[in-house]
Amino acid sequence: MPALPFTNTPITNTPVTSTPVSSTPNERPLAELLPLPGSQEPLRGPTPAGTDWQRELANAVRDPDELCRLLALDPGLAVDARRAAGDFHLLVPRGFIARMRPGDPRDPLLLQVLPRPAERDQVAGFSADPLQEQQALAAPGLVHKYAGRVLLLTTGGCAINCRYCFRREFPYAESGASQAGIETALAAIAGDTSIHEVILSGGDPLLLDDVRLATLVARLESMPHIRRLRIHSRLPIVLPSRVTPALIEMLASTRLTCVVVVHANHPAELDSTVEAAISRLAEARVMLLNQAVLLAGVNDSVAVLRALSERLIDLQIVPYYLHLLDRVQGTAAFEVDDASGRSLHEQLRTVLPGYAVPRLAREVPGEPAKVWLG
Ligand code: SF4
């Protein structure tokens, strides 16, 4: 039986492991593919061994003082950030910082990652699990909300800590995204022939290294009723070096139809390094979609949303969803109300061709599908 590739790393931490290079995933013993002891701890200090993306991840900025120094920002912002962050600490790759405007505390990329005092406010209507995902757990680490498809929580780790994150409070360890839980989750998928699509989520599923990912995909391929693999990941945007030749080879060679949903919120995120990564993904002939979150101060204008869609289309990524914010505790400062969201979406329809207009959507617990507002 192939190894189980999950980690139970909480989203507040970043696993960085070296990539095994010998043998095929199916041949590797379980113990070799498990996360290395201590891998839950973000690496600091000297550059570790590993692939380029793992080194970049290990060297991501975690210190608010350093971020403010790099961007020539008021050091007082760092003091506020340290107080505001709580357990959901600052985490941002240097390549993403390079796309921010120095000296601008309102930079739309900076706002997505810099903890702000408002995160500590208790706001009515905002809670730890507004989507009630824990109630939708069909097995450990397996969310089954919609017909025909399931969401597999592969890891709690991410390469970036987005302040608006819908799973920033999600108790990964308690929800079974773990070595012990994965076999149960895979058995549940294998035993339910109504499931045709598996969505890898997290955290960020591309934080699994190529061998772990290939192992998981091989397990899914062995189930005849599984036809599609969907990967939701922000790594091609925030850490484009993660799009490795081995990843492309895996996506190109699987019998499963592959859909990769990237998460970009602002056109400034889509620089030449992202463009190169997206070109590599396009070579694997995967379907490329984007989902964005409508965020106050970041992309809540027609001009920005239009520029985002046009840039995505240039990169051959279909703008798929524009999500209204999930009302997670600590994220209220990012909320755009429904009426404003609808108005922006209406205006967007007048300046873009239909194929470039994302669906305006919200997830509502208990509904059989996402609710479309436009
Ligand atoms: S990449 Fe997605 S899952 Fe990870 S912190 Fe950002 S919003 Fe959350």
Image: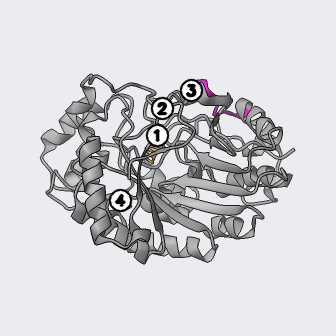
Q: Nearer the viewer, mark 4 or mark 2?
A: 2
| Earlier-in-chain disc, 4 versus 1 | 4
The answer to which image quadrant residue 5 occupies is top right
Percent coordinates x, y for residue 199 in the rendering: 63, 49
- Between the residue at mark 4 and the residue at mark 2, the CA separation in whole angstroms equals 29 Å
Q: Is residue 370 left or right of residue 60?
A: right
Q: Which mark is residue 96?
A: 4
The residue depicted at 73 percent of the width and 30 percent of the height is 180
Q: Is the residue under label 2 in contact with that under label 1 (CB below 8 Å)?
A: yes
Q: Which residues are magenta?
A: 174-179
Q: Is residue 277 left or right of residue 104?
A: right
Instruction: From this view, report whether residue 158 is shown above or below residue 277.
Output: above
User: The disc labelled 4 sits on which kind of residue?
Assistant: Phe
- Between the residue at mark 4 and the residue at mark 1, the CA separation in whole angstroms equals 28 Å
The residue at which mark 2 appears reads as: 131
Q: Secondary structure at mark 3?
A: helix
Q: Is the residue under label 2 in contact with that under label 4 (CB below 8 Å)?
A: no
| Earlier-in-chain disc, 4 versus 3 | 4
User: The disc labelled 1 sits on which kind of residue?
Assistant: Glu
The residue at which mark 3 appears reads as: 134
- Crowding around mark 3 (Cα neighbors within 10 Å: few <14, some 14 to 19, many 20+) is some
- Between the residue at mark 1 and the residue at mark 2, the CA separation in whole angstroms equals 7 Å
The residue at which mark 1 appears reads as: 363
Q: Nearer the viewer, mark 2 or mark 3?
A: 2
